Amino acid sequence: AGIVHAASVTHAAAPSAIPWGRLLAGLWVLGMVLALARVAAGAIGARRIAWRASPAVQAATTIADAWRTLGGRGRPPRVVVSDEIEAPVAIGAVAAVIVGPRSSAAWSAERWRLVLLHELAHVRRRDGLANLVAQVACSAHWIDPLAWIAARQLREQRELAADDAVLRDGTRASTYAEH
């Protein structure tokens, strides 16, 4: 009677009531889908701004010259103005469009030239594509703060590179900073 059977001592591993692996995988996929939706919504919103904008007649003579200065080939990107933005921006990963604020109508030719050099440098370097790749990578690694930090650093370095392109053209740093 004092004998304990081995079968009664061995406990079969009870299946977990909560499938943690599937829940975590589902959470990761949900986060990735939401992040990608955010990227898509941003891209669509930016394109809509460019589509609704009107041609920037003030920049018409300056854009081809600025594009050649940067070594751009083919036709330069379209330049438009919009009420929906407050600062110039290059929109698009493939077919870029430069959008300036409506208030740019009052800009001097020199300011337009500097702005175009900066924004065209982004286009020439394909920064829009680099930004898209970084956003997709952040979407896939949405839970990793290092991915977001790296993407922020990439954005900052792209801005510095575009600023350097303007300064390499011979623009004084103080003049560029004023604009």
Image (cartoon, helix red, strand yellow):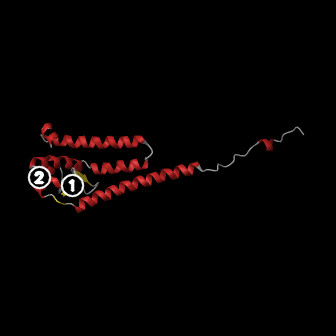
Q: Quadrant of the C terminus?
A: top left
Could you say which is closer to the camera, residue 34 or residue 150? 34
According to the picture, the residue beneath numbered tag 1 turns out to be 99
Q: What residue type is labelled 1?
A: Val
Residue occupying image coordinates x 21% and y 55%: 99
Residue occupying image coordinates x 15% and y 57%: 56
Tell me, yes or no, if residue 70 can be seen here: no
Q: Which mark is residue 170?
A: none
Q: What residue type is labelled 2?
A: Ala
Relative to residue 98, is residue 132 drawn left or right?
Answer: right
Disc 2 crowd, CA 10 A, few/some/many (<14, 14-19, 20+): few
User: CB of mark 2 within 8 Å of CB of mark 1?
Assistant: no
Could you say which is closer to the camera, residue 101 or residue 127? 101
Q: Is mark 1 on a helix, strand or loop?
A: strand
Q: Quadrant of the N terminus?
A: top right
Q: Residue 106 carries which label?
A: 2
Disc 1 crowd, CA 10 A, few/some/many (<14, 14-19, 20+): many
Marks 2, 1: nearer the viewer? 2
> Percent x, y for residue 117?
17, 47
